[in-house]
Image (tube, rainbow, N blue to C red):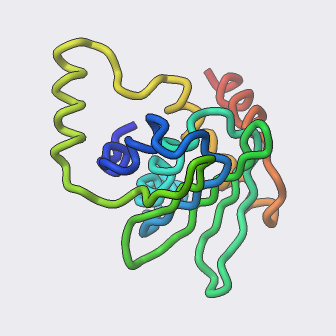
Amino acid sequence: SSSSLRYGKTTQAVRNGSIGKVPRAETWSPCHLEKTHPELFWYGIHGVESLFTVMGTGCESVKRGATRDGRIEVAGTWRGGRVGIYREDPKGYGGIAKGEKGESPVGAYEGYHPLVAEVVKFFQTGVAPVSPEETIELFAFMEADDESKRHGGAEVKIVDMLKRASATR
């Protein structure tokens, strides 16, 4: 997991509790497509990283939809009914997290310095800055989005994507 958006100041503040528990977050980013990658895996991952940074693990299902102007919209449902939405936005990166104590912008691009600092720390300590569980669930979210798209926007369970990945080992 390596998007620099994960390490933005407001995104990290929300992750660390600045607005309390987050029942809803919406993030957006460009989603340029690359024919060798599933849709979100190329550029969409940046907005998805921001979403997972503030929502954490616990996503149970994903549904692919579209915005009114036909852009990608992915809705995830987390344990306890929490909702996280990723939207394609060719104009830039951002988001809003709605917490128990207020709202905060998230997902802004603030350069690569915060990411590089985390990479250096990782090489020094051997401790990954993002848990394997969160990284795997983030990728399962993106794979579930692709599966949902293939099935006309049907809800796809994250656990099914994880089982499928385990079966291919």
Q: Is residue 135 above or below residue 61?
A: above
Q: Position of residue 93 (x, y in %)?
A: 39, 66
Q: Is residue 169 above or below residue 63?
A: above
In the image, 14 versus 40, the foreground residue is: 14
Tell me if 9 is positioned left or right of 34 in this view: left
- Residue drawn 42% across the image and 77% down it: 90
Q: Position of residue 35 (x, y in %)?
A: 47, 63
Q: Is residue 110 above or below residue 137?
A: below
Quarter of image, res 36: bottom left
Q: Position of residue 51 (x, y in %)?
A: 52, 50
In the image, 78 versus 143, the foreground residue is: 78
In the image, 36 versus 105, the foreground residue is: 105
Would you say residue 32 is visible in this rendering? no
Q: Is residue 113 above or below residue 90?
A: above
Would you say residue 57 is visible in this rendering? yes
Tell me if 16 is positioned left or right of 21 in this view: left
Tell me if 23 is positioned left or right of 156 in this view: left
Tell me if 140 is positioned left or right of 134 in this view: right
- Farthest-out residue, bottom: 69
Q: Position of residue 109 (x, y in %)?
A: 29, 59
- Residue drawn 41% across the image and 28% down it: 130
Say how many tags the image has: 0
- Residue drawn 76% across the image and 32% down it: 159
Point out the image quarter for the C terminus.
Answer: top right
